[in-house]
Amino acid sequence: MRIEIRGRLRRSRDWNQAISELEQEIETVEDVEQRSELLFEIANVTEEIVPERERALAIYQRAWKLFPENIKALTRARQVYGELGRLEMVAKVGELELKLRNNDGELAALVGLAFLDSGQREKALPFLHIALEARPDDLDIKDAIAAASYNEEGWADDVERLSDEAEDADSSTAGRMLLRAARIVHHETPEDERYEQLLKLSLVNNPQGKPANYLYEKLLSTAERWTELEAHHDRRIYAAAADSEKGGLAEQFGLEWVQRFKDRERAAKFFKLAIEHSTIDGAPSQFGSLVAAFALVREILGGAGRWDEILELADSILPVLGDDQKLYIALQSGLIAWKELADLDRARRYFSIVAELESDSLDLADFVEENGPLAEQEPAEEEPAEEEPAEEEPAEEEPQ
């Protein structure tokens, strides 16, 4: 099924338009289970090629509402909301999913933490207790329960005690203590300056801690402190140990900037970093939204006339891409070299890659029609004409 959808995209001039056409055609499928499955597959592909996740999310939701037993559509929607930092939606969708998965402990933990950090601590507690039954030794869950069920009359004393004890604790424990204190302060006095201070101290001890980072990023974005938020993301990428981790963070931040913070230029910056880091370990296939990332980088850098920079990025990743990603990148690069730079030799190299992967490409056909074959055919060498044997002259007769 997915192969058929990808084949349709390969032959299309505009992949976004092809997605819309496929959505319309699926409406004619009478079997609701089959139609739901087709929508799920289209949503998967949409994630790969469209930078904004809201389009894929809408299709996932349609797939689930059409056939509620298609739980994987609901699961993927919840995961995408998590990637975007939309914890209130993680909690809402996760709560629905949990009813269908018979109070799964791992999922209950995700839902409970999402409710807690989206400001709904009363709703968080039942889910956190379900999670604790499944994971009785999990310190993060215990801390979350403590942060959601503190003594409201003595909360200030609790915060002071946790801050003091954190000074003598190891980094991991200190990070958890300070996060717990920050959560309490935020529930009681959201505008208190101590909230930001405690989050920063927690991050000093645990720079990549997800809950503290989410809360700190939400604080900065709510206050529209965009330069500080960008710098925070830069520091997180710099502090990551492996290139695969750096690439994963850069992809996450790109998605957040384009969807959550509505800043396409900063999104393009982080997507470009994600693409660059994805090639260092030679495993860009792990970068599922590489095509979507490249599309946004092309849009922003192309708008500034930085076409050569886009092609340099493409050249760095083409040798290690899988067929579908390679086709899209080569096609876009060929169009840039042809239409924007008028560099036909370079365009031919990119379109030669396209020809190997999808000979029916409409853009390839346009290029060949206007500019001739991709490779000039060498004239056949003429074979030398065979020499006819010379006629022997009759021997002269000697005079008698």
Image (cartoon, rainbow, N blue to C red):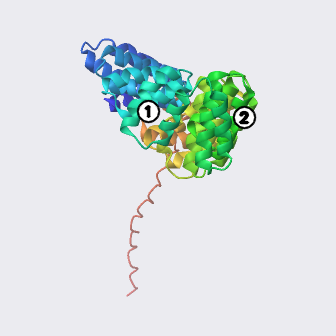
Q: Residue at x 50, y 30 (%)?
A: 113
**Left or right: 161 as drawn, with respect to 362:** right
Whether 62 is drawn above or below 299: the answer is: above
Q: Residue 197 got which mark?
A: 2
Q: Nearer the viewer, residue 399 or 242?
A: 242
Of the numbered discs 1 and 2, the one sitting upstream in the chain is 1
**Is 308 above or below relative to 98?**
below
Could you tell me which secondary element the residue under label 2 belongs to? Answer: helix
Q: What kind of residue is marked 2?
A: Gln
Q: Is residue 247 visible?
A: yes
Residue at 50% x, 24% y: name it: 115
For the residue carrying disc 2, how many other residues have a C-alpha within 10 Å: few (<14), some (14-19), or many (20+)?
some
Q: Position of residue 147 (x, y in %)?
A: 55, 31
> For residue 199, what is the image quadrant?
top right
- Residue 28, x across and y down, in percent: 30, 11
**Residue 395 marker:** none
Considering every residue shown, the one lying at the far left of the view is 31
Q: Is residue 387 above or below residue 256?
A: below
Q: Where does the N terminus fall, quadrant-wise? A: top left
Which residue lies under the disc numbered 1? 109
Viewer-proximal residue among 382 and 77: 77
Tell me if label 1 and label 2 are in contact, CB under 8 Å.
Answer: no
